[in-house]
Image (cartoon, rainbow, N blue to C red):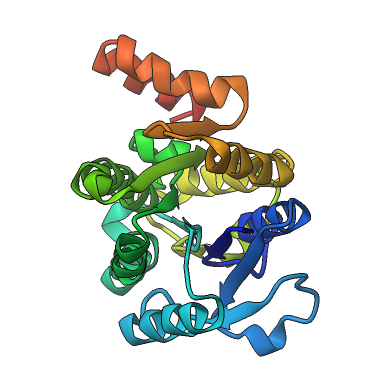
Amino acid sequence: MNKVVLITGGSSGLGKAIGEFLRAKDYKVYGTSRNPDKIKDSVFPLLALDVRNPQSIQNAVSELISKEGRIDVLVNNAGVGITGPIEEMPLEEMKNNFDTNFFGPIEMMKAVLPQMRSQKSGLIINITSIAGYMGLPYRGIYSASKGALELITEALRMEVRSFGIKVTNIAPGDFATNIAAGRFHSPLLPGSAYEKAYGSILKTMDAHVDSGANPDDMGLAVYAIIQKQDPGIHYKVGTFMQRFSIILKRILPDRMYEKMLMNHYKL
């Protein structure tokens, strides 16, 4: 029996790449989009869903269960970027980021768990970020939201293991997707104390995304995890230096690691 996979944010970027890869492997793939009627090029069905809206989540999950009778894999992929000095970041934008990157995925997991528990099986894969392992300058809110999802993954994994449900996460580095276009960028305020440093880092961050890896690599990573009998807790997908930066944080003194980041960002 082909497994049923639900991917949030499946209309573009990493979600679309993951869905297309799994569909080519004969999985029954469903993606989600806030406006699925506007998406004309999807090779798999898209359900209407906004991860910031609990009722929208319940409706989409109920629709999928009605169609397929089961949910074998949830890929919590929907997310948004956010940049800017923390001092100048609008509160509503910080809340929106956490609603999308943290609370939304939690509500998705809560929505599928009863079905997975009744099946006595299921796999949840949370897409986090290598940025979630460190507080990055001018990306602090994004780092915090993804880091929080990493910790929730660890906790939930232990809570649901006895039900036959597995939980893991994948932390990607920079990929060539449209995430930069969808980010909220705090405006460069003339005369701001952060104008020069933030403006320089903003250009660097967008350049990293533009020259990022092929999103198909994430499809392969998700596929490999689904094949495992007992997936690990954390997976990282990115360049050697991106993955090595996490190891360095574990072994270097705090101030030395901080200095390394500041040199990287020319601060």
Decide if residue 177 is in sight here.
Answer: yes
Is 185 left or right of 3, judged from the image as shown? left
The x and y percentages for residue 195 are: 45, 51
Q: Residue at x 38, y 56 (%)?
A: 192
The x and y percentages for residue 164 are: 32, 48
Q: Nearer the viewer, residue 256 or 81?
A: 81
Q: Residue at x 26, y 11 (%)?
A: 253
Q: Nearer the viewer, residue 175 or 103?
A: 103
The x and y percentages for residue 247 are: 41, 17
Q: Residue furthest front?
A: 1
The x and y percentages for residue 111 are: 33, 72
Judge whether 118 appears above or below 123 on screen: below
Q: Quadrant for residue 137, please give it.
A: top left
Q: Nearer the viewer, residue 186 or 76?
A: 76
Judge whether 218 appears above or below 98 on screen: above
Decide if residue 89 is in sight here.
Answer: no
Q: Quadrant for residue 143, please give it.
A: top left
Is 67 left or right of 255, judged from the image as shown? right
Is 130 left or right of 164, judged from the image as shown? right
Q: Residue at x 40, y 33 (%)?
A: 234
Exactly how many numbered labels are in the figure?
0
Q: Residue at x 60, y 31 (%)?
A: 238
Q: Quadrant of the N terminus?
A: bottom right
Judge whether 244 appears above or below 178 on screen: above
Q: Quadrant of the C terminus?
A: top left
